[in-house]
Amino acid sequence: MVDKLVEAREKHLKQLRFLVKKVRFLDERVDEKFEAWQQAAAKSRQRLWTGFKRTDKELQSLFSRFHFKQRIIDEMTLVTENIRDKMQSSLQRLESSITRIIRRVGDDSQVREGKPARTRTLRAPAA
């Protein structure tokens, strides 16, 4: 919280409760409008894009009312970038695993000929 609001901390915290609810509501609306724009026919895309931008601008204007110190915003940005990187890495590993499984099943002639497939017993290492 910005230093000048420390003295009015209780008042600011009450305002934050209202602000968080409003931001959540607008964030959901922005998501809905963006999804509607993505799925819309070419004829209505411009109108939907304008509605999306208007709601997004309203949402963006509320962020400054949180009065975070710049250091906090920078730290939050680093955390979100780290989470995004981890999610991307997990998604790539998942896609790679799915591709290997599909290749393995597709190349296994024994499965196609009705012969029993090779099996492996997987177990946790002894501790």
Image (tube, helix red, strand yellow):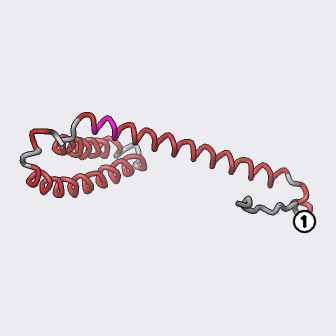
Q: Is residue 92 above or below residue 10?
A: above
**For residue 114, side relative to residue 16 (left or right):** right
Dividing the image into 4 quarters, which one contains the N terminus? top left
Query: Where is residue 5, by image quadrant?
Result: top left
Decide which of 72, 29 is in the foreground and name it.
Answer: 72
**For residue 39, side relative to residue 91 (left or right):** left
Q: Residue drawn 16% across and 57% down?
A: 18
- Which residue in the protein does label 1 denote? 116
**For residue 98, side relative to residue 45 (left or right):** right
Q: Judging from the image, what secondary structure is the residue with disc 1 in?
A: loop
Query: Where is residue 78, by image quadrant?
Result: top left
| Magenta-drawn segment | 72-76
Q: Residue drawn 21% across and 37% down?
A: 69
Decide which of 113, 92 is in the foreground and name it.
Answer: 92
Q: Is residue 73 above or below residue 118?
A: above
Q: Residue drawn 11% across and 45% down?
A: 6
